[in-house]
Each structure stands twice: as C-alpha cells, then as structure tokens.
Image (tube, rainbow, N blue to C red):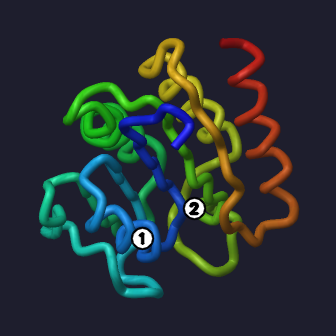
Amino acid sequence: HLGLERVAILDFDVHAGNGTEAVAKKEPRIQFVCSHQMPLFPGTGDPTFSGPHGNILNIALPPGTDFTTYRGIFQDQMLPFLDVNGKPDLVIVSAGYDALEADPLANLCLQPEDYGAMTAMLLEHLGHQKVVFGLEGGYSLTDIPKAIHSTVSAFSSH
C-alpha cells in the first residue's frame, strides 16, 4: 500500500494500454490517461469509454499526428485529467517510444526532443509529486536512445 491513496497512470505508448485500462476500470483510486494511435493493435482504447468510475481517458490519435497537435492534447487534456479526482500521490508513466516518426511499426510523427518537452511539461504540472517512468515499446534503434536521453535530460533541468 505504501501510504498511497491515489495513483495516476499516464500512458503515451502508441498502442492502447488495454491491460492497465482493465485494472483501472475496477479501481476508482487509479486515474488512467492513455494516448495511442487508432486504428492500431490491439484495437482497444475507445475514446468514448471513461470506465464505470469516470477515471479513464483514452485519446485516439490518427496516423500522422505530430507534436504540434500532440502538445495541445497533452497540455489541455492529458495533464489536467491526472488531477480530476484530486492530486495523485504517485504518477506512473508508461513511456512508449514507438510514437517516434522513425518507428517502423507505427505512424505517429514525434521527434526525440518531443519526449523531453513532454517530460518537462509533466514535471512542471506535477510540482513535487512522486513520478516513476517505465519503459514501454519502441523499435527505432537510432531514435530511441535520443528520445530517452531527451526524457532524462528534462529531469536534470527541472
């Protein structure tokens, strides 16, 4: 339990977080927000589904979405949703790097530096709240290290 009453999970992997969503829909203390390309495997992540507790936000992104569009969604929808039911005690980030434009298995158009920008926005939004990043998918062997470096650099400059 670790003294945590509320946990928020932010998933920016290119695939819908169907396993995390299955847990969140049973647990009202989990706030889950997920952005993903649609249509794409696993075919879940219906943007009209908010769960029985209203604690789920799915954002379906069309192929070709770039950071100009994504930034607005991240700032205006994803970050505010983390706090809808009050500030979480912990934020877990499912950090998927398969939304990179160079990724061969998906069709979103983020650049490595965009991950640093998202991380900086998240850290600014959270203030001094606890946050944990978990590495998810990604298949561009040239751009993943750059994107991860950009993510970690945002922590060191925060």
Give me the disc on residue 14: none
Q: Quadrant of the C terminus?
A: top right
Residue pointed to by mark 2:
99
Q: Residues within 10 Å of mark 2 (few under 14, many from 20)?
A: many
- Position in image of residue 143 (x %, y %): 79, 55
Q: Viewer-proximal residue, 111 or 78?
A: 78
- Position in image of residue 148 (x %, y %): 77, 44
On the question of residue 59 being in view, the answer is: no
Mark closest to the chain's N terminus, 2 or 1: 1
Three-letter code for the amino acid on which mark 2 is drawn: Ala
Alpha carbon distance from label 2 to label 1: 8 Å
Residue at image x 49%, y 37%? 91
Residue at image x 49%, y 32%? 3
Apparent side of residue 29 relative to residue 1 in the rendered image (left or right): left
- Position in image of residue 44 (x %, y %): 34, 81
Circle 1: element type: strand
Residue pointed to by mark 1:
37
Q: Viewer-proximal residue, 32 or 80?
A: 32
On the question of residue 123 being in view, the answer is: yes
Q: Residues within 10 Å of mark 1 (few under 14, many from 20)?
A: many
Asked if labels 1 and 2 touch by Cβ distance under 8 angstroms, the answer is: yes
When the figure is inspected, residue 99 is found, relative to residue 42, above or below; the finding is above
Residue at image x 28%, y 31%? 83
